[in-house]
Image (tube, helix red, strand yellow):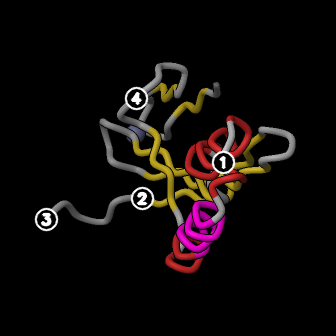
Amino acid sequence: MAKVLCDCGESLWNGEIPNQIEFHAFSDVQLIDMFNRLEKFEADQSNINDEYWRDRRDDILWPPINVWRCPKCKRLYAFEIDRDTASRKLKYIYKLEEQL
Ligand SMILES: [Zn+2]
């Protein structure tokens, strides 16, 4: 769980699961790599156990980039995720230029 005070004054918190603030972002290469690993393991059913499913769940819940969107101003906060330490580091902040 973490908190961020948005530049607009809104308090962002990801402690509620699920929530409408947090997005799990993957590059196309990372997503295809995940699918390839799923196919590889599922081809050999003997590899599928509780640890296997925990790792696949963590693949989705702990992507390399985690994005939060402020519900008030739509500003995006992009965090780099360190899966080994289950920590995040704010890397970029994107401000909405115009709403279409
Ligand atoms: Zn905001």
- Camera-side mark, 4 or 2: 4
**Residue to which mark 2 is pinned:** 95
Ligand 1's image quarter is: top left
Q: Secondary structure at mark 3?
A: loop
Q: Secondary structure at mark 4?
A: loop
At a point 58% along the width and 32% down the height, the residue shown is: 4
Packing grade of label 3 (10 A; few <14, some 14-19, many >=20) is few
Q: Residue at x 48, y 25 (%)?
A: 11
Counting residues from the N terminus, which is met first, the one under dot 2 or under dot 3? 2
CB contact under 8 Å: marks 3 and 1: no
- Which amino acid is tagged 2? Lys
Q: Earlier in the sequence, mark 1 or mark 2?
A: 1
As drawn, the label of residue 48 is: 1
Mark 2 surroundings within 10 Å by alpha-carbon count, few (fewer than 14), some (14 through 19), many (20 or more): few
Mark 1 crowd level (few <14, some 14–19, many ≥20, 10 Å Cα): few
Q: Which mark is on residue 15?
A: none
Asked whether residue 71 is drawn in magenta, I would say no
Distance CA(mark 4)–CA(mark 2): 21 Å
From the viewer's perspective, tell me whether residue 25 is left or right of residue 74.
Answer: right
Q: Residue at x 41, y 37 (%)?
A: 21
Task: Please identify the residue farthest to the right as the structure is shown.
Answer: 85
Please name which of the two marks, 4 or 3, marks the residue nearer to the observer: 4
Can you say whether 51 is above or below 35 in the image?
Answer: above
- Disc 3 designates what residue? 100
Question: Which mark is in front, 4 or 1?
Answer: 1
Q: Is residue 95 left or right of residue 38?
A: left
